């Protein structure tokens, strides 16, 4: 139940920049709060000490609320939502393992890719084929900015690649790898160059840390991935 609520929260958050953005943000917060409340009721929260990063986030959240009280009252709902989200996530990460959170992220990433392909695939093809005298068009699905496309689908790509590596089922591996490739295409179509660099560095570091340098170079999937990246960069050089 916790996994389902967390996944729903992350998925509806993808639509927070659409015309129904406010409703999606409220729905995401409600799902996070529901997951945290369920974890507390079922006594699934591990007694882990608060980390330094959490402490800093709590300070920022409280400071945001205090500043809203003595400053602009219009910012109060956003400040309270920010603080509640931090509290809910702090509870959730003590109820689920890192592997579970990463698997949830992979599923949400897959659903996000399917949603974009279903709704905005023609826009992606137009953006990839633009250039020259037509001018550069940037892929912006669901109302996202190009940089946001890079951040969201760059992170999705890392989660999907990680799931493709750890799973033992070839059918799932192919689906995850194909979705990761679609994420790269989305980032490329958005011309989010900084995200491309960050994606490459994050992916390389993550794989090296997990498998070691020598074993990584011997992985067939890594070699295929490197070849695919080279082919895409050559085919869409003006985007890179």
Image: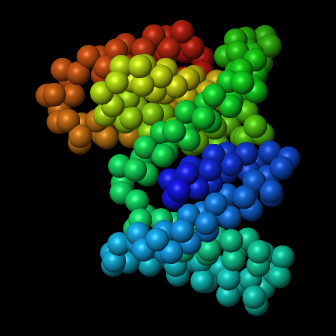
Left or right placement of residue 4 versus residue 164 in this view: right
* Residue in the foreground of this view, choosing between 145 and 93: 93
Left or right placement of residue 163 versus residue 236 in this view: left
Which residue occupies 80% across, 57% down?
23
* Residue in the foreground of this view, choosing between 133 and 171: 171
Q: Position of residue 135 (x, y in %)?
A: 77, 18
Dividing the picture into quarters, in which one does residue 199 lie? top left
**Residue 171 higher or lower than 101, as above or below:** above
Q: How many marks?
A: 0
Which residue occupies 63% across, 46% down?
11
Residue 193 visible within the image: no
Q: Position of residue 108 (x, y in %)?
A: 56, 41
Left or right placement of residue 240 versus residue 81 in this view: left
Residue 151 visible within the image: yes
Dividing the picture into quarters, in which one does residue 225 lie? top left
* Residue in the foreground of this view, choosing between 132 and 202: 202
Residue found farthest to the front: 42
* Residue in the foreground of this view, choosing between 21 and 201: 21
Dividing the picture into quarters, in which one does residue 161 lie? top left
Q: Position of residue 188 (x, y in %)?
A: 58, 25
**Residue 57 higher or lower than 163, as above or below:** below
Dividing the image into 4 quarters, which one contains the C terminus?
A: top right
Q: What colour scheme has been applied to the protein in the rendered image?
A: rainbow
Which residue occupies 62% across, 36% down?
112
**Residue 69 higher or lower than 84, as above or below:** below
Which residue occupies 26% across, 16% down?
220
Residue found farthest to the left: 214
Q: Position of residue 110 (x, y in %)?
A: 55, 33
């Amino acid at each position: 139940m916790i996994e389902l609520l967390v996944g729903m929260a992350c998925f509806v958050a993808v639509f927070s920049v659409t015309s129904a953005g406010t409703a999606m943000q409220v729905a995401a917060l409600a799902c996070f709060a529901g997951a945290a409340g369920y974890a507390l009721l079922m006594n699934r929260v591990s007694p882990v000490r608060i980390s330094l990063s959490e402490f800093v986030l709590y300070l920022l959240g409280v400071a945001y609320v205090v500043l809203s009280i003595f400053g602009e009252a219009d910012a109060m709902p956003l400040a309270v939502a920010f603080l509640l989200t931090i509290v809910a996530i702090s509870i959730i990460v003590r109820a689920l393992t890192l592997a579970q959170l990463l698997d949830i992220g992979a599923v949400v990433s897959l659903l996000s890719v399917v949603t974009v392909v279903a709704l905005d695939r023609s826009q992606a093809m137009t953006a990839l084929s633009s250039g020259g005298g037509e001018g550069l068009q940037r892929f912006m699905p669901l109302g996202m900015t190009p940089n946001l496309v890079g951040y969201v689908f760059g992170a999705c790509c890392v989660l999907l690649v990680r799931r493709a590596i750890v799973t033992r089922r070839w059918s799932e591996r192919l689906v995850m790898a194909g979705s990761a490739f679609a994420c790269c295409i989305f980032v490329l179509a958005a011309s989010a160059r900084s995200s491309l660099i960050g994606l490459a560095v994050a992916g390389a570091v993550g794989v090296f840390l997990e498998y070691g340098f020598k074993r990584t170079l011997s992985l067939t999937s890594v070699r295929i991935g490197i070849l695919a990246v080279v082919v895409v960069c050559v085919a869409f050089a003006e985007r890179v």
